[in-house]
Image (cartoon, helix red, strand yellow):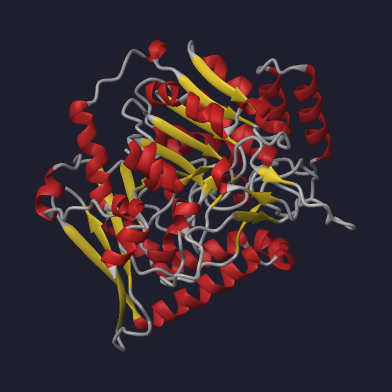
Amino acid sequence: MLQQIKQREPEFTLTQKVEPIDIAEFQQTLDPETAIVEWYIGNPKFNNQEWGGTAFIITRDKIDLIPTTATELAELETWKNDYLNEYRDKAKQKIWQKTLSAKLHKLSEILRVNEIVAKIPNHCRQLILVPHRYLHLFPLHALPFTSQTRFTQETMLFRGNLLDCFPSGVKYAPSLQLLELVQNRIKTRTSPAPELQPLFAIQNPTEDLSNADMEVQIIKQRFDTHDILIKQQATKIAFNENLKNLSNASYIHFSCHGVFNFDYPLLSLLALADSIESIPEINPPKPPLGKGGLQEEIKPPLGKGGLQEEINPPLGKGELQEDKPETPRYVTMRSGRKAIPEKCLTLREIFADLELNNCNLVTLSACETGLTSSTEMTDEYIGLPSGFLYAGSMSVVSTLWSVDDFATAILMINFYQELLPKVSVAVALNAAQNWMRAVSKQDLGVWVKSLNLDKKSGQSVELWLMASTEEQPFSHPKYWAAFCATGY
């Protein structure tokens, strides 16, 4: 069957270049102040009556483990199904938003995060999370816990989540193998001085994300050299013509629509200009609110994540029938428009074509760019972050749900302000997330004024602030917890 797949899909082999690693040798490569938590989630159909999985706590000197019982696995399966059903059902998305904090508390209990944290030595300042199966879909860095042993004076402002108590950052890895691959690049890669590190960006290619323009225009100011494809300029043809600039870039930033395709992962994509067809409709539906169609109490512009995983025609999982098309022709947006894969940047092309040997960071400021399949039993997931890491990037920032356009622009701008020389991506992202959680409406207004926005962007921000009724407008995890740092 593997041979049939390889003949039918030559790119499949690009996802299979994984060599086994020696865990004892791998441990010796770890920084003494780094801890890894790696989960293995069993299959309830085949598990015995007592065991459901294991969380491994790996440090340079030892490996501890916290077992998951079959009862806890059943509870986790129920929790996962409820979470995903509410998120994916448009009628229940408000419920998903309002109960997100409570859901994360429950997940923390099921995964026994208090016990896991207690096993991590206090001298470990960096935490790397390696989820398994559907755990890749959830913001584990935002899981709360009650143990007080990890908190320091610097983290007293927040006493509750994993990202609050590891000063050197909380980040993710698709697997230990890919983490080792990225770490090995440090030995051979030389980076130019910070002032000589160029930016390559895609800015609002579909022209329906007003805050994406503000986001990229502010971010580019910190780079002396930048190549930006703006709006209608950012076509697939222009992207391919700029592959050399892309390969030379130290930082790559996509501010656009994104989608993970659950049925056909290699067709997951980032939308470029002229990639979306309009379908004439007698009574077209109203466009969704928020980047991914999530209803917001404050009406933001059209969301970045309006792309659904629906395929037409569908491709059966594991089916190799000759009467099926080799690839779906398009991906359907919630508005009814069609995204044409040939005019987008797909995960297949990222694996096959991109060479990012100078890249420190790829930022996917789009919806659902960190998602993976929730049903497969593979040890290492296939998704946009793993694709960009495989292509050569040291780190990737991605999202776990349909994120709000305005809040994302604010977070991204602050993230790049935090991303100073010798500051890791995870530390900068965690700092930006904590700032988002705590910033008051008044302080946000002062900070925005310091950006010297153009008149249009400034007015848009003022209107948003006037409409907000919360003293801390971004404290809810729906605004900040979706963002994950993956890689080195």
Q: Which residue extends farthest right?
A: 282
Q: Name above or below for residue 293 compared with residue 303.
A: below
Q: Name above or below for residue 31 compared with residue 109.
A: above
Q: Which residue is drawn at 36% across and 43% down?
A: 352
Q: Name above or below for residue 41 compared with residue 405.
A: below
Q: Which residue extends farthest bottom?
A: 49
Q: Which residue is drawn at 48% across and 48% down?
A: 159
Q: In this view, does 369 lie to the left or right of 46?
A: right
Q: Image quadrant for the N terminus?
A: bottom left
Q: In which quarter of the image is residue 350?
A: top left
- In the rendered image, is residue 167 in sight? no
Taking depth in this image into account, of 240 and 115 the one nearest to the observer is 240
Q: Name above or below for residue 437 compared with residue 421.
A: below
Task: Please state the horizontal and vertical placement of residue 296, each as a whole percent of the image.
Answer: 75, 51
Q: In this view, does 249 lie to the left or right of 435?
A: left
Q: Which residue is drawn at 15% across and 48% down?
A: 26
Task: Please state the horizontal and vertical placement of residue 270, each as a whole percent of the image.
Answer: 55, 42
What is the tally of numbered marks visible in this picture? 0
Q: Image quadrant for the C terminus?
A: top left
Task: Please state the horizontal and vertical placement of residue 232, each as a whole percent of the image.
Answer: 67, 28
Q: Which residue is drawn at 65% across and 63% down?
A: 96
Q: Quadrant of residue 113?
A: bottom left
Q: Which residue extends farthest front?
A: 323
Q: In this view, does 382 lie to the left or right of 255?
A: left
